[in-house]
Amino acid sequence: MFSLEGKVALVTGATGGIGAATARALHQAGATVAITGRRAAELEALAAELGSRVIVAPADLADPAAPAALVEKVEGEGGSLDILVNNAGFTRDMLALRMGDADWQAVLDVDLTAPFRLARSALRGMMKKRWGRIVSIASIVGVTGNAGQANYAAAKAGLIGMSKSLAQEVATRGVTVNVVAPGFVKTAMTDALNEAQRTALLSRIPAARMGTPEDIAGAVVYLASPAAAWVTGQTLHVNGGMAMI
Amino acid sequence: MERVTPMSDTAEKVKKIVVEHLGVEESKVTNEASFIDDLGADSLDTVELVMAFEEAFGVEIPDDAAEKITTVKDAIEYIEKQKAE
Ligand SMILES: NC(=O)c1ccc[n+]([C@@H]2O[C@H](COP(=O)([O-])OP(=O)(O)OC[C@H]3O[C@@H](n4cnc5c(N)ncnc54)[C@H](OP(=O)(O)O)[C@@H]3O)[C@@H](O)[C@H]2O)c1
């Protein structure tokens, strides 16, 4: 029910905390994983750890041509692309008053536009095969908003709206499109928080701890699996109870 | 004696794609058949068909042209015109 044997998955941001954990989890479930990110050395290290069933595909998702080329490479080397995990993302936090157009656009490009381009390219093959999974990693702040993150929260909310729309377009083709919205997870992204911010955050999490990358990876594997065939257009919040929505 | 005009290569290929894609009987795929009204296609099928035509014939079918392709004949004529250009 949860086996991904014979499936090929593409995980973006696989050099990061959540992406690497997700690639490992999908691999453990039997999938061939294509891993991407800008840092080729990190990708090679992860590939060496995984051993077999792995495709290394470095790319900069700020490049408009990268998504289509990535999908083509994975379909060429892996034979198909069955599972797309849009995980790559970054923040450029500042109050809106000081946020320049470039700060806004850079985040939108990588966190929202690249996932759309990847989904558009991947859907073709998925629809033909009558099976596919697209899972995008949004964020709790895409639903709640967060001061200092107008660009990032807009991109993450955008992923949710995009996924609901795509889900409706392709539901008859056996392709599901869902979102995982993490709360605060211990990765490079949140290492930037200072002690005071961390304590304040923890006091708002009923589970009283930050999430681990594996906490998120488990949700992705579920949505990617045959078990979740009837789940589409949904946002699965994984946040230790921080927001119950 | 009346001569039967042979089906053009394009027509044959278009019909084959339609049969394969929509999973309908070959006999139903007449020139006049409408993808949606006669062959049971939904809007997504028509987009997929247009993409399949583009791939098979190496032509570009822009959205405004694609919208007007509603029957088998429309597709054949559009592709033949493109190829002639
Ligand atoms: N950590 C959290 O608390 C948290 C909470 C909610 C949502 N999220 C989301 O979870 C996802 C993963 O984040 P993380 O916490 O694992 O952060 P991370 O460790 O910083 O990883 C971010 C990943 O995104 C990739 N990336 C960034 N810009 C890229 C670009 N231009 N082209 C290609 N890849 C790019 C990075 O790869 P390279 O550096 O190799 O290019 C890296 O692998 C992100 O979408 C993030 O928004 C995280």
Image: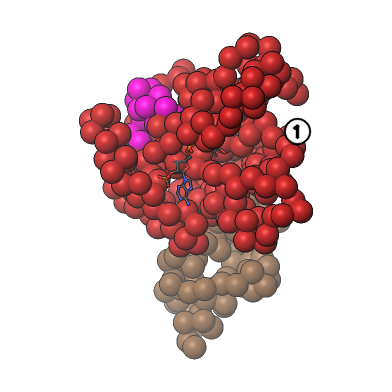
Relative height, residue A78 to residue A141 (above, below): below
Q: In this view, does A228 lie above or below A112?
A: above
Q: Write the start and end of the magenta stretch as one range.
A: A21-33
Question: Which lettered chain is shown in brown?
Answer: B
Q: Where is residue A159 in the image (x, y as percent from the top left)?
A: 64, 43
Colouring rule applied to residues: by chain
Tell me residue B18's x, y (percent): 52, 58
For chain A, the rendered hue is red
Query: Hey, what amino acid is under mark 1?
Result: Thr
Q: What element carries label 1?
A: helix
Q: Mark 1 lies on which chain?
A: A
* Residue linked to disc 1: A144
What secondary structure do most residues of the magenta stretch adopt? helix
Q: How packed is label 1: few (under 14 Cα within 10 Å), some, or many (20 or more)?
A: few
Q: Residue shown at 36%/41% (left/top)?
A: A35
Q: Which residue is drawn at 71% across and 18% down?
A: A204
Report the front residue among A71 and B14.
Answer: A71
Image coordinates for residue A79, horizontal then vertical, percent:
32, 45
Do we see residue B16 in this rendering? no
Left or right of A149, for residue A117: left
Residue B85 visible in the shown view: yes
Residue B53 vs residue A120, the one in the foreground: A120
Residue drawn at point x = 58 percent, y = 29 percent:
A194
Q: What residue do we see at 35% from left, 50% from top? A: A58
Q: Nearer the viewer, residue B18 or A100?
A: A100
- Is residue A68 one of those drawn in magenta? no
